[in-house]
Amino acid sequence: MNASNSVPDGFAPIFMVEPFTTMIGPIYSKPDGAHLFRLGFRVAQEHLNIERVVHGGMLSTVADQAIGMNVAHANSQTNDVLTMHLSVDFISPAVLGDWVEASVSLSKVSGRVRFGNCELRVGDRLVLKASAIFAARVHKGR
């Protein structure tokens, strides 16, 4: 595997498998402290828009996945969560071959409504900032 296709140490294919994530991947995850995960992906041709930078939809999706996955698994929980709101600020572009990595901070991880923030970076360079609100699904019979 050459450097342009390599995955940084500690990252493994994302454990959350769903049809959409499979279609846009591969996306990788790595434990990041107590019950948090980082997500990352290597920019491929399929992720680019007409301007030859990563499509905003791809970046937004990774931020949404990163916050949602962390909100769902915070505090040793495993909850189904649904995005209620996602706010995204695009700061700088990512290009073919870049390793884009998501780090998350959580504001509220209990109750029905939960909050988190995400930064996507290529190395030290900030690519995107996002904040999201999630609803924890209520299962009947629980």
Image: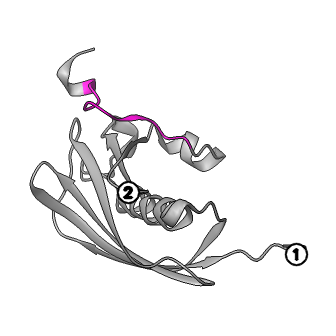
Image x and y of residue 132, in percent:
44, 78
Q: Residue furthest right?
A: 141
Q: Quadrant of residue 89?
A: bottom left
Are the residues flagged by discs 2 and 1 in contact, CB closer than 8 Å? no
Q: Is residue 7 magenta?
A: yes
Secondary structure, mark 1, is loop
Q: Hey, what amino acid is under mark 1?
A: Lys
Image x and y of residue 56, in percent:
35, 62
Q: Is residue 134 magenta?
A: no
Q: Quadrant of residue 117?
A: bottom left
Disc 2 from disc 1: Cα separation = 29 Å
Q: Residue at x 20, y 55 (%)?
A: 121
Figure check: 112 above or below 93: below
Residue named by callout 1: 140
Residue named by callout 2: 34
The stretch of residues the image draws in magenta is 5-15
Q: Residue at x 49, y 41 (%)?
A: 14
Q: Nearer the viewer, residue 34 or 139?
A: 34
Which image quadrant: the N terminus?
Answer: top left
Image x and y of residue 93, in percent:
18, 57
Image x and y of residue 84, in percent:
57, 81
Q: How many marks?
A: 2
Figure check: 85 above or below 61: below
Figure check: 98 above or below 54: above
